[in-house]
Amino acid sequence: MRHIIIVDYDPLWKQQFEQEAHALRPIFGTQLVALHHIGSTAIPNMPAKPIIDIMPVVKDISQVDSLNPQFITLGYDPMGELGLVGRRYFRKGGDEHRTHHVHVFAVGNPEVEKHILFRDYLIQHPDDATTYAAIKRQAAQDNPHNIEGYMDQKHDLIQHIMAKASAWHRHK
């Protein structure tokens, strides 16, 4: 059973992203368009589950399944779409020692912009980042072994922040 723990921001998360990105880029070869650090570990001073979220953007999502053996070699578990059509998801470290999540999307998938916008908005809006950090901590405390409950508790605030982020993006 996975234990949900939120820890204070660690400046080493950026370096851990870079190290893993260096290992992942060759797997994708010419399919890779971009590779982003997303999620709370990509937001300075944001407390987070200590799991690095990486978002490769590729030309053709249907080609990613053929890369599963290379991901397995790096210690990842290929999880397919795992409930999100158009994504390929990989996790590293199993349930108890999870270190990385890789969320692969094709160019043009709206999830790409959504993840980047959420990250960038919270970097630029520390008051909303503080509010989000507080709900994350509370959700982890309330749901220490229930990832669905943790996600559900954050859902409404995430939707509110996304609406603000979209308006901010339109008026930049």
Image: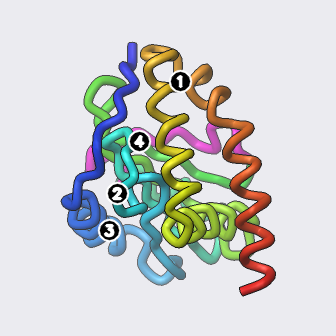
Q: Nearer the viewer, mark 2 or mark 1?
A: 2
Which quarter of the picture shows residue 104? Answer: bottom right
**Residue 153: image location, x then y, percent:** 64, 27
Q: Earlier in the sequence, mark 2 or mark 4?
A: 2
Q: Determine whether the residue tagged by mark 3 lies in a helix, strand or loop.
A: helix
**Residue that mark 4 sits on:** 91
Whether residue 85 sits left or right of residue 30 in the image: it is: right
Front-most of residues 28 and 21: 21
Q: Earlier in the sequence, mark 1 or mark 3?
A: 3
* Mark 4 residue type: Arg
Does the stretch in magenta take in 77?
yes
Q: Earlier in the sequence, mark 2 or mark 1?
A: 2
* Mark 2 residue type: Asn
**Residue that mark 1 sits on:** 147
**Residue that mark 3 sits on:** 21
Magenta span: 71-84
Q: CA distance from mark 3 to mark 4?
A: 14 Å
**Residue that mark 2 sits on:** 45
Q: CA distance from mark 1 to mark 4?
A: 15 Å
**Residue 98: image location, x then y, percent:** 32, 35
